[in-house]
Each structure stands twice: as structure tokens, then as C-alpha cells.
């Protein structure tokens, strides 16, 4: 086993700061954008937005800390966050007006410390944010969408079975679940992109015919975006140069000077060195964060686009491997600083402490299809391991020629960090992308974003969480409604579709027909609302800063929001289908096949939340076959519901895209959904979590990973191009020594050979976690993973902690 | 031979990673002629299917109580207070009168919570093979296969031999985890179908061996020599039991004996005693004593390992 080298003192210092982070919220960005909008109220949105981005970037505070070699800050503090009033910012005022979440300390600073998300704001910054409250009333992107709705929306959303709930702003998060074109920014530079736009604009001056007006405005917005980038990066260059002047220590002075010079260069031109490539990546990320609150901007194939620079540096003797490794450390720590203020409900769904900057390593070369791993691939794994970071999420792309060394290091990282990296199977994903219309070269260049979603790198507008991050249907609720004549037992709300009562259903086929009808009904509504809000977003919320790097946009003169990208799709996810499958199996087994109870008895029992029916509930838990045990009787229903969902997705499309992707992932959403899902026939009680993503229901898989894998292969993974998350908890004793690591590798290989798309392993023991619940301070480094993301265990809510503990341990 | 003989099995475990090479499926057969007090699976001792009572799973007679009326012999009665310590407060649990119970299984069939359940189930050879074959891709990737364990699998000789043959016919790697206490004639028949023996050796002192586990060590040692002579491969497993076999003298004698087996032995494993058998023992009709002791220290195990290494053996501590 490779011994991980030590980190430098300044990296260690930054690591401490990041671990204990309290994100200081400030009003700088909000005030700057407000001022810009005030001046340009009636300017077309595409220009108004790009102008605002320029104003924000040219006025922002640019910092460089003593210990930094990669710079960039989201707010005015090292660990700060600006906010984005322009999409919808009601949550902040509601939190303060509600008066419960934020607690004022003796220094007049407010703290929000729920669920371990530590935010703070000073009285002064809070007042500034209140000063712009009135300006934004009726002016946010969401206000444009919320002022009118398609008929029937209110009734449908009141059911509470999707991402939509009554009174919510439907457009307060922009799209932006994707991999931006970092390689283009690094390799081409802003000046050349700007010139391309300017050439078009110059050529069409006074001669805008037909659709030219739209293109003209797009290219104008692109110029503004490039200027915004240049202005911001120059700001950082100035900060470095200034800091150099006051620096007493010669080596650091020279370093700061060099950083400043490099920043000046990359503010317009392509990167020349590894450091410049990494810093340019971070600067572009920051530009996007200044542009909008994109929820999940993934770094893409970081090892692929930075390695050529490192290789050249090494060949020229400009850098040592240790120096390069420090840059990778600094990059990953900087990514951890990009943690943005968000309302608590978002934490419930996506999990705490994740910046959603998924980073992909390994995989194959786009041109040759050969293994593409390189020294940066290994550095990323080692840095995550030696810094014990759980963020950003790392996916390692596995293919048939993945080197044994890389396997070993990836599994070593799993043991150290827990849950990371995610193992993704090229052999399943690449052909599936080609089937979906990707050119082979682009398919081979795919990357992962968000929790799990599969996207093209820098050429795709994939909207995998729907266009405005409202992409989930709560399938547990749908099941309850299907068996309760279209009424949600949790709140008594009814949908328009009546599918009868379980106790009137004469056959299992009738049960399935009811479920299928409700799935189609709900998905139809979900996509209707997506398509409605996307229609408004195309006008109100184009993304120039993003479009300059996404292949297709500059070529076509069309913003990526409006369909300018080379590839377009959208999608959503169904988390916890195992709960649905187990419920269907329960009905089949108990009522129709074994006749151990009547449909009425079963219905009455779970409608009473099992109260007074504990023996029946226990019999279901004990006797009924469950998904995840390699039992065809149970797996059949999982395959059925996956197929129903997938086939329903096949009918969905939007103005921008013909392709609606199905996914089986969901971060922590199975907990949040479960909290408002009534009891289900599988023995689950009201409020308990659903199964997690594509995994078997908690504690129901009793025969270890090989059986789970065999069960998972009952459905076709290629159908789920929005991503699959299978979370397997492995007891550390299963992984002892080199032999244990080899067995984990082999079990994964066999799963992937069989058609498995993804797996992630959580190597922790329940005892560790119980101890951590009692003594959080001593277990600060304990990282766990819930499908698609990982977090510090002690930062999770107690309910989520208990959920993790209750998962089956794959004990020997 | 009957075409598809059946055996009594108490567990089939997938992703078994410590019972032979690679990823394995381990089939645990019920019944053992030895009575080791340190046994970590006391539910494997008896050959017949037997009742198990796990208080932690019981939901209480107030809401359930199905078992109370199900027993034809009246062997289940409401427990007196002390029995409920294991579970949440306030539940009225039950008690099994083990002397009256004849393991008919009627109560277990009624119990909805799995609190009363039966250890052991009859499986035919083809059922076991079907189960094992589902994991074939994992075996192939990892160089794994099927391990037949126990209890003492060679005590169900007909079934075990048929199972071994069937597994080999399907091209699977086979390991046999055995106490070695079986007639040589049975071992000899198994030999061609066993890729690897996992053979327990406990104590070279025949009297101490007999006194502790109830059978002599002589047949075991002879079988070990026989396997070596016939070209079989063995991993020797030595449970390290405080005050029974953890003396330097015993380890030296074991080391010498194993070294003499020569190349037949691929690995020697030290299995330090642990108390995980005790909670299982508490759930069943007591059949022989159980040892509850503290596990040997890492230091102690290190010393014993060093002794064995003097005999040029490859040692692994589990
Ligand atoms: S197994 Fe024993 S306790 Fe259970 S019903 Fe039969 S005799 Fe009674
Ligand atoms: S039947 Fe089972 S759960 Fe019910 S009281 Fe008896 S032991 Fe407890």
C-alpha cells in the first residue's frame, strides 16, 4: 500500500479552517446586483443579467490569504458567501422574520447552526439585505413564473407528492447542474472568446435580419461575460501584487508576485502552466458563482484537462511532483470554500456540507478509448485521502483496462474517507450515451455532476434535475395514493386521478395498473411545470457566463438556456423505488399468493400506521421476500416499477429537448420524502425514510453485497442515464489488509461486468457511528456517504444519523 | 446414491471473505461430534433442527402472544421479569421451558417477529448448488468459490460428498472447513473434490484435547497426515483459547506437526478466541457448556505467531 505523504504547513492550516468553517454571509454581491438592475430595469433580460454580472465582478472584494496559493472567494470573507436576490430570496427574510433560526450572540452577530450548517451574518450586513427587500418584490425570476400558473397546478401541488409544494417560489434556483467548459476557458482564454463574439457583432452592425436580433443580444451578453471575467481576475492579480509588496519573506513575496503575473495573463489568455490551469479553473468557477446561484457546477474531468500542463511543466523542470501535489491540495480545499448560503430545507434534501462540485477522474481517452489515467488522477485520490475530505464528490471512471494501481488507490481512499470515490462504469455508460445520440468521442468524455448525474463535458445542457431543480416525485406517496383512490393519506389531499382502493382490487394486476396510472399522471404534471418554468426562464434567465464555455452556444449564437448547447436533455429522479417494490411484493405475497391476510386487513393496518397491527407488520418484515436478497420473487417488482418509470419518462419532452432522462439517485432526499410519506404496505411506518436511491430498503438486504448486486442487476441500468446511486455499507472487517481491498475490487468488477452502472462503499461500523453520536467532537473526521454525497457524520441530523445506522451492515 | 440427497443447513452466507481464497459462498451444515466450550456457533452443535428464542425481537405478549397458544406441549409460558432485561422496558416476554420443548416448530411458524425461529433447514444438493451458482461471476473475478463449513460437514457424509461432487461438476472451487474428526474412509472420498481443506488443529496433547472437546485428537492428526500424503492442500486453523491451548509448548508441538505436513499446508491461521458465540448460546437449549472469557491480547497472539514462525510457516492472524 502506498503511504500518503504529509501536507505542507499552510495546507494543514487551511484544512483546519475549512473543517471548522462558519460561512459568513454578506450583502456585497446583493447590493451590487441590485444597483445594476435598478439602472437597467427595462433593458432586455439577457443584457441586463450579463451587465449585472459584469458590475458584480468588477466591484467585488478580491482577497488573498497568507496561506493561499489558489485564490478566489465567494464573499467578502475567506469563508464567505454572497447571496442572490435576483432569482428569489424570500427564504432569508422568512428565516429572520420567523425569528427562530438565527440567534444573535453578544457581539451582535447572528448565527444559524441548524443541522450543523454554520452560517453567520452581522447586524450591518443583515440590515443591508433588508434594505433591498422591497426592490425585488415582483422582480425576481421566480416572480415572473409565480404570477400565473397553468390550470390545475395549485390543486396538484397541494397533494405534496413532488418537489412542488403550495406557496413555494418555483424559480428561486436557476438550472445549472452541469459540467461547464473548463478546458475551453483554459485552452482558449477569454480574449479569444470575446473576439469571436465581437467579430459577429461588428459584422452585423445595423444589419439584423430575422433571428439575428436574438443572436446579436447573445453575443453582446457573451462580450459582457468575458469582460466580467477579465475584470474579476485582474482584481485578484492586484490583490496578489499588493500583498507581495508588503510581504517580508522573500520566497513568499516572489510567489505572490508570480501569482499576480499569472492572473494577469489568464485574465485574457490561455493558461501556460499547471498552476495557471488550476487557477483559471477556479476563477471560471467563481465567475459562474458571481453570475448566478448555479446549484451543481461540476469540475468535470479535472485530471484530463490539467495533466497536459503538468506534463509540460515537469518536462521543462518548472515544477516538482510535491509542488504539483500541493496545488491539487489547495484546489480541493478551495473547492470546499465554495459553500453557499442556502435555506435549511435545501439541506434536508441535498444534505449538509456538500458543495456539489462533483469531480471526475480516470476513464478512457476520448479519441483512443484507451485508459486515460495520469499522475493527476492519483494526486486527487491521495489528496482527498490525506486531507480526509468528503467534498468535492469524486467519481472514478472504471473501465476494463483500469490499472490495478489505480484500483488499489481508489479502494484505499474508500477506506480512509468512506463513501468516496464513487465507482462509475464506463462500459455501461459510454454505449448508453451513444445510444442516446452522443458522438462516440463525446460519450467517452462524459463526466458526473451533482449526486450522480451523467453529462457531457462542456458540450451538454443536461438539466438532470429538471430545468429549475424541481425534479422529484415522491414515489412512496404515489403508491399510497394509487391504493387509496387518488388521495394522499398523509394530508387528505386528492389528485384528479381516481384509481380505486386496495380492498376493492380483485387481482394483483389491478394493483399494478393503479400504480402505473398514478406514475404517469404525476410525471406528466411534473414535466408540465418544468416546461412552463423553462419557457419563462429562456427569456428571464439566460446564462451568458456559462454559455461562453459550452460547445454549441458561441457557434450558434444561442444561450445554453435556450438550447444553444451541442447536446440538450433534461431529467429527474425516483429515489426509494425499493420501498415501492417491497410494498408491491407484500401485497402480492400476503394477499394474493399466500393469502395470509385480506386486502382489507392490510389496508386498514397501514392506514392506521400499523397501530394495533404490530404482529402483521412484523410478519411482513420477516416473511415477505425483499428486494436486495437475490430473490427473484422480490426483484420482479423492482424491475417492474423501474420499467414503468423509465417508460413513462420516454414520453416526456420540452421545447428545448426531446430527451427526458430517468434516474435512480437522490442524495438525502429519501429521508426528507419519508418524513411526509404515510405508512406503506411494506411495513414502513409514517415518517420513516424511504429506501435510499437505488439501494434496497434499509435493513432489508440480509445476504451481503453479492446478493445486493445480483438483485440490482434485475433492471437495465442503461435506461437510467440520469444516474444510479447504489450505496453499500461495508463493515471494515471485510476490508482488512491487501486481500480485503482486492476482494472489494473483485466484487465491484464482477458487478460492473454484469452491467452495474455505479456503486459507492461506506466503510464504517454501526458502533463507530453510535460512539460518534455520543461524542461528536472525537469523531469529527468520520465521513459517511448517503447515495450521491458524503458528509461529516456529526453534522447530520439525528434522524439521518439513525437512518444510516439502521442500514444493513454487510458483516462477515 | 440417491439422486439429490438433502442435508441440514443452518446458514448460507454470500460474500464470505475469510473462509478461503477470494469471494466465497459458505454453506454451514448443522451438527458436530465435538463439544468445544468456546464454540462460536453453538447453534451448529446439534444435528437436528432446533428452536431458537431471541428476546430482542419479541414484541410482547400484550400485542401478540401467538406462541403461548401455539405450543401443544405448553412449553411456552409468560416470562418472569428478569427475562425482559434484553429488550425495551415494559414488554411482557415469554420463556421457553427447554425441558418440555421437543422442537416441533409450531411456535416458530406462528411467531410473526422472528423471535422464535428454527435453526436448521433441509436443503437438497441441487438447491444449494443453484444458490451458489448465482454468485459465480463473483467467484470467477476473485478466485473464490464455495466453502462447506459447519458444524462438522463430514458428519453429514452422504450429503457433503454429493454436494462437493456437484460443485466440482459445475467447475467451482471448493473448500471444506472441518474439524478433521471423521473416518478416513469419508475423508478419502472427499479428497478428489476438495480444492482446499480448512483444517482445525487445537491441541497436540491428546488428553487435554479429549477432556475439553470430548473426542481424541489422534484421528484428526492422522487425517491431516493422510490428506498431505494424498496430495491435498490445507490451511491449518488454530483457535487460540485462553488456558486451553495457548501455551508455548502446545504451539511448538503444533508448529512441528504442521511443518512435517510439508507443502500440503499453504497457510496457518491463528483465530483468537472471541465471545460472539455466547449470545447465540443463550438463545437455544443448552447443549454442552459455553466458555465466556476475555479475548487473548494482541501481544499474546504476536508471541504465538512468532513461535509458529520458527517452523518456517506462513502465518495469518484473523
Ligand atoms: S418448538 Fe417447542 S416451544 Fe415451540 S411449539 Fe414446539 S414444543 Fe412448543
Ligand atoms: S409469538 Fe413471537 S413475538 Fe409474539 S409473543 Fe411469542 S415470541 Fe413474542
Image (tube, helix red, strand yellow):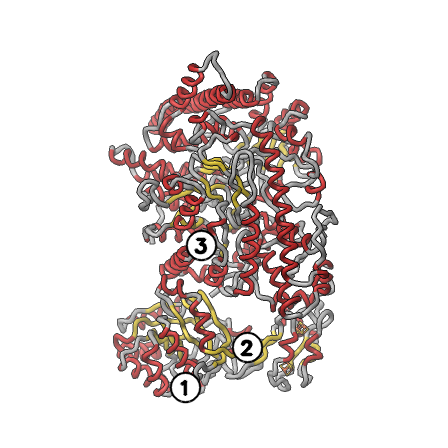
Please tell me which residue is depicted at 60% across the width and 40% down the height of the picture.
A527
Determine the CA span between mark 2 and mark 3.
35 Å
Q: Decide: marks 2, 3 in contact (CB < 8 A)?
A: no
The quadrant holding residue A593 is bottom right
Q: Which residue is mark 3?
A: A756
Element type at marker 3? loop
Q: Quadrant of the rendered structure where residue A530 is?
A: top right
Mark 2 surroundings within 10 Å by alpha-carbon count, few (fewer than 14), some (14 through 19), many (20 or more): many
Taking the image as shown, residue A54 lies to the left or right of residue A500, namely left
Rendered view: B90 above or below A174: below
Q: Nearer the viewer, mark 2 or mark 3?
A: 3
1 vs 3, front mark: 1
The answer to whether residue A780 is above or below residue B244 is: above
Residue B1: image tag: 1
Image position of A81 (left or right of A601): left
Give residue B119's mark: 2
Q: Position of residue A609 (x, y in %)?
A: 71, 58
Amino acid at each position: 500500500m502506498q503511504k500518503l505523504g504529509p501536507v505542507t504547513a499552510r495546507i494543514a492550516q487551511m484544512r483546519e479552517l475549512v473543517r471548522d468553517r462558519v460561512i459568513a454571509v454578506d450583502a456585497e454581491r446583493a447590493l451590487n446586483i441590485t444597483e445594476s438592475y435598478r439602472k437597467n430595469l427595462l433593458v432586455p433580460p439577457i443584457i441586463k443579467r450579463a451587465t449585472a454580472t459584469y458590475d458584480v465582478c468588477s466591484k467585488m472584494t478580491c482577497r488573498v490569504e497568507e496561506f493561499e496559493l489558489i485564490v478566489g472567494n465567494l464573499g467578502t470573507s475567506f469563508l464567505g458567501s454572497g447571496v442572490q436576490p435576483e432569482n428569489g430570496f424570500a427564504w432569508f427574510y422568512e428565516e429572520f422574520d420567523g425569528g427562530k433560526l438565527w440567534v444573535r450572540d453578544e457581539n451582535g452577530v447572528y448565527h444559524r447552526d441548524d443541522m450543523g450548517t454554520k452560517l453567520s451574518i452581522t447586524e450591518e450586513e443583515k440590515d443591508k439585505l433588508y434594505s433591498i427587500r422591497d426592490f425585488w418584490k415582483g422582480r425576481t425570476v421566480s416572480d415572473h413564473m409565480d404570477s400565473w400558473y397553468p390550470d390545475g397546478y395549485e390543486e396538484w401541488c397541494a397533494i405534496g407528492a413532488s418537489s412542488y409544494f403550495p406557496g413555494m417560489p418555483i424559480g428561486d434556483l436557476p438550472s445549472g447542474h452541469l459540467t461547464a467548459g473548463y478546458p475551453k476557458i483554459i485552452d482558449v482564454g477569454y480574449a479569444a472568446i470575446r473576439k469571436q463574439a465581437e467579430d459577429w457583432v461588428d459584422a452585423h452592425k445595423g444589419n439584423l435580419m430575422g433571428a439575428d436580433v436574438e443572436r446579436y443580444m447573445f453575443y453582446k451578453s457573451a462580450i459582457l461575460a468575458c469582460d466580467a471575467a477579465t475584470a474579476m481576475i485582474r482584481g485578484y492579480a492586484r490583490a496578489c501584487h499588493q500583498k507581495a509588496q508588503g510581504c517580508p519573506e522573500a520566497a513568499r513575496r516572489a510567489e505572490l508576485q508570480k501569482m499576480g503575473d499569472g492572473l494577469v495573463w489568464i485574465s485574457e489568455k490561455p493558461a501556460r502552466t499547471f498552476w495557471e490551469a488550476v487557477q483559471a479553473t477556479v476563477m471560471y468557477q467563481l465567475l459562474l458563482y458571481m453570475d448566478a446561484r448555479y446549484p451543481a457546477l461540476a469540475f468535470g474531468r479535472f485530471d484530463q484537462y490539467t495533466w497536459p500542463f503538468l506534463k509540460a511543466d515537469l518536462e521543462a523542470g518548472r515544477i516538482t511532483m510535491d509542488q504539483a501535489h500541493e496545488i491539487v491540495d489547495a484546489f480541493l480545499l478551495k473547492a470546499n470554500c465554495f459553500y453557499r448560503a442556502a435555506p435549511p430545507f435545501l439541506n434536508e434534501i441535498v444534505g449538509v456540507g456538500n458543495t456539489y462540485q462533483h469531480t471526475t477522474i480516470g476513464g478512457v481517452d476520448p479519441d483512443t478509448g484507451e485508459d486515460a489515467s495520469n499522475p493527476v488522477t492519483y494526486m486527487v485520490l491521495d489528496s482527498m485521502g490525506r486531507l480526509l475530505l468528503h467534498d468535492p464528490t469524486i467519481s472514478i471512471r472504471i473501465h476494463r483496462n483500469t490499472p490495478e494501481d489505480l484500483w488499489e488507490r481508489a479502494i484505499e481512499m474508500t477506506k480512509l474517507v468512506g463513501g468516496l470515490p464513487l465507482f462509475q462504469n464506463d462500459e455501461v455508460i459510454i454505449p448508453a450515451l451513444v445510444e442516446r445520440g452522443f458522438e462516440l468521442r463525446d460519450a467517452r468524455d462524459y463526466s458526473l455532476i451533482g449526486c450522480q448525474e451523467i453529462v457531457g463535458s462542456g458540450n451538454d445542457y443536461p438539466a438532470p434535475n429538471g430545468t429549475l431543480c424541481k425534479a422529484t416525485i415522491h414515489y412512496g406517496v404515489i403508491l399510497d395514493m394509487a391504493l387509496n383512490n387518488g388521495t394522499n393519506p398523509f394530508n387528505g389531499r386528492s389528485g384528479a386521478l381516481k384509481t380505486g382502493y386496495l380492498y376493492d382490487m380483485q387481482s394483483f394486476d389491478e394493483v399494478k395498473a393503479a400504480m402505473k396510472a398514478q406514475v404517469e399522471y404525476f410525471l406528466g404534471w411534473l414535466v408540465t411545470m418544468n416546461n412552463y418554468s423553462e419557457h419563462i426562464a429562456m427569456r428571464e434567465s439566460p446564462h451568458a457566463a456559462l454559455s461562453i464555455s459550452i460547445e454549441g452556444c458561441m457557434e450558434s449564437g444561442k444561450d445554453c438556456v435556450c438550447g444553444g448547447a451541442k447536446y440538450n436533455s433534461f431529467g429527474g429522479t425516483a429515489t426509494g423505488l425499493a420501498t415501492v417494490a417491497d410494498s408491491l411484493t407484500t401485497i402480492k405475497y400476503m394477499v394474493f399468493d399466500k393469502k395470509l391476510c385480506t386486502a382489507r386487513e392490510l389496508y386498514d393496518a397501514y392506514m392506521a400506521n400499523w397501530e394495533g397491527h404490530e404482529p402483521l407488520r412484523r410478519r411482513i418484515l420477516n416473511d415477505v421476500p425483499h428486494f436486495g436478497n437475490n430473490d427473484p420473487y422480490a426483484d420482479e417488482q423492482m424491475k417492474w416499477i423501474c420499467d414503468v418509470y423509465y417508460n413513462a419518462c420516454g414520453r416526456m419532452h420540452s421545447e428545448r429537448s426531446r430527451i427526458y432522462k430517468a434516474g435512480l439517485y437522490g442524495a438525502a432526499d429519501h429521508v426528507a420524502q419519508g418524513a411526509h410519506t404515510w405508512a406503506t404496505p411494506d411495513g414502513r411506518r409514517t415518517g420513516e425514510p424511504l429506501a435510499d436511491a437505488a439501494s434496497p430498503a434499509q435493513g432489508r438486504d440480509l445476504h451481503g453485497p453479492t446478493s445486493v448486486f445480483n438483485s440490482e442487476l434485475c433492471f437495465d441500468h442503461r435506461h437510467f442515464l440520469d444516474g444510479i446511486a447504489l450505496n453499500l455499507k461495508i463493515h471494515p472487517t471485510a476490508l482488512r489488509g491487501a486481500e480485503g481491498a482486492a476482494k472489494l475490487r473483485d466484487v465491484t468488477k464482477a458487478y460492473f461486468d454484469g452491467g452495474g452502472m455505479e456503486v459507492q462503499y461506506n466503510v464504517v461500523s454501526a458502533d463507530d457511528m453510535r460512539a460518534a453520536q455520543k461524542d461528536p467532537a472525537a469523531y469529527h473526521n468520520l465521513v459517511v456517504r448517503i447515495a450521491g454525497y458524503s458528509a461529516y457524520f456529526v453534522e447530520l441530523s439525528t434522524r439521518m444519523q439513525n437512518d444510516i445506522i439502521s442500514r444493513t451492515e454487510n458483516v462477515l | 446414491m440417491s439422486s439429490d440427497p438433502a442435508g441440514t443447513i443452518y446458514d448460507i452466507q454470500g460474500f464470505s471473505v475469510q473462509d478461503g481464497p477470494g469471494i466465497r459462498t459458505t454453506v454451514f451444515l448443522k451438527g458436530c461430534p465435538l463439544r468445544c466450550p468456546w464454540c462460536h456457533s453453538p447453534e451448529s452443535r446439534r444435528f437436528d433442527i432446533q428452536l431458537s428464542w431471541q428476546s430482542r425481537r419479541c414484541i410482547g405478549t400484550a400485542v401478540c402472544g401467538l406462541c403461548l397458544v401455539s405450543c401443544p406441549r405448553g412449553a411456552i409460558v409468560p416470562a418472569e421479569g428478569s427475562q425482559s432485561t434484553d429488550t425495551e422496558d415494559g414488554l411482557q416476554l415469554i420463556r421457553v421451558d427447554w425441558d418440555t420443548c421437543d422442537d416441533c416448530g409450531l411456535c416458530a411458524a406462528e411467531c410473526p417477529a422472528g423471535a422464535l425461529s428454527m435453526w436448521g433447514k433441509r436443503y437438497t444438493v441441487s438447491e444449494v448448488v443453484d444458490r451458489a451458482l448465482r454468485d459465480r461471476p463473483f467467484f470467477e473475478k476473485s478466485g473464490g468459490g464455495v466453502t462447506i463449513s459447519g458444524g462438522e460437514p463430514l458428519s453429514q457424509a452422504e450429503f457433503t460428498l454429493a454436494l462437493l461432487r456437484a460443485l466440482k461438476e459445475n467447475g467451482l472451487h471448493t473448500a471444506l472447513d472441518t474439524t478433521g474428526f471423521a473416518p478416513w474412509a469419508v475423508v478419502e472420498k472427499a479428497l478428489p473434490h476438495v480444492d482446499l481443506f480448512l483444517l482445525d488443529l487445537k491441541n497436540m496433547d491428546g488428553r487435554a484435547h479429549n477432556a475439553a472437546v470430548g473426542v481424541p485428537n489422534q484421528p484428526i492428526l492422522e487425517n491431516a497426515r493422510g490428506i498431505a500424503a494424498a496430495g491435498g492442500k490445507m490451511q491449518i486453523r488454530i483457535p487460540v483459547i485462553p488456558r486451553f491451548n495457548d501455551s508455548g509448548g502446545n504451539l511448538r508441538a503444533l508448529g512441528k506437526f504442521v511443518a512435517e505436513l510439508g507443502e500440503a499446508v499453504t497457510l496457518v491461521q491463528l483465530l483468537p478466541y472471541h465471545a460472539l458465540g455466547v449470545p447465540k448460546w443463550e438463545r437455544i437449549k443448552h447443549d454442552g457448556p459455553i466458555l465466556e472469557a476475555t479475548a487473548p491480547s494482541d501481544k499474546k497472539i504476536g508471541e504465538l505467531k512468532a513461535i509458529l514462525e520458527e517452523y518456517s510457516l506462513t502465518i495469518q492472524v484473523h
